[in-house]
Amino acid sequence: MTPTRRGLLIILSSPSGAGKSTLARRLRAWDPEIEFSISATTRAPRPGEVDGREYHFVNEASFKAQVAAGGMLEHAHVFGNFYGSPKAPVQAAIDEGRDVLFDIDWQGAQQITNSALGAHTLSIFLLPPSIRELRQRLEKRGQDDAATIARRMSKSWDEISHWGAYDFVIVNDDLDQTEAQLKTILSATRLRRSQQPQLTEHVRRLQSEFEEVS
């Protein structure tokens, strides 16, 4: 069956601690058909990780070959390993009317926005209400030691400084309110003209009907 709309590439970015992961989970709970993009990486699997679930685990030669062939929407070299978003499964998803969610930084967002699929992106940046609040959230998570929190805080301003490159920017002062805003943005963007390929044919039918009754 022909899909009634094209899928969206939903890009969600924020400094660490601004609520991105929590809100991504809430979006998927609201609409389980939203898919997470599964990245490819050259790092070795960690205990409990499954190929094709957490990541697509590939060797460096294969990864570079995919990049050279234009098979990655975005890619980066991080701490000695390559990471990237394979293009083929994302292209298949949006052609079938399924949305794909990307939890990536501003550099990856920029690459995807400038890619061949850029017309179908929806980019959203989440800002913290304050830097003090951002630090408190990182400390309350209890996941990182003081040195790691310091590194995350140091990187946070670099992330925040790119807020102007996104379609929408939300100050995440209240999770429930931000979730409601995200749903509104997504619902409206799904109705964007570029996401509704059937409109052209519908207008043609209207034109034919108009000519018949005129």
Image (tube, rainbow, N blue to C red):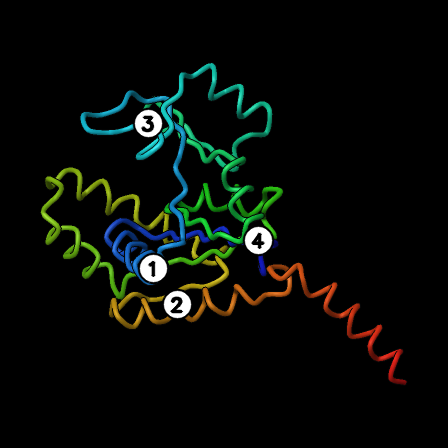
Q: How far apart are the two marked residues, 4 and 1, measured between alpha carbons? A: 18 Å
Location of the C terminus by quadrant is: bottom right
User: Is there CB contact under 8 Å for labels 3 and 2?
Assistant: no
Q: How far apart are the two marked residues, 1 and 2, measured between alpha carbons? A: 7 Å
Residue under label 1 = 27
Q: Earlier in the sequence, mark 3 or mark 2?
A: 3
Say the numbered circle drawn on residue 172.
none
Say the numbered circle drawn on residue 183.
2
Height in image: 180 above or below 163? below
User: Is there CB contact under 8 Å for labels 1 and 2?
Assistant: yes
Element type at marker 2?
A: helix
Q: How far apart are the two marked residues, 3 and 4, measured between alpha carbons? A: 28 Å
| Apparent side of residue 29 relative to residue 82 in the rendered image (left or right) | left
> Which of the two discs, 3 and 2, sits closer to the camera?
3
> At which x and y percent is residue 50?
28, 28
Residue under label 3 = 51
> At which x and y percent is residue 130?
25, 63
Element type at marker 3?
A: loop
> At which x and y percent is residue 108?
45, 41
User: Is there CB contact under 8 Å for labels 1 and 3?
Assistant: no
| Apparent side of residue 17 relative to residue 184 in the rendered image (left or right) | left
Q: Amino acid at mark 4?
A: His
Q: Amino acid at mark 1?
A: Leu
Q: How far apart are the two marked residues, 3 and 2, measured between alpha carbons? A: 31 Å
Residue under label 4 = 120
Q: Quadrant of residue 46?
A: top left
Element type at marker 1?
A: helix
| Apparent side of residue 213 relative to residue 32 in the rendered image (left or right) | right
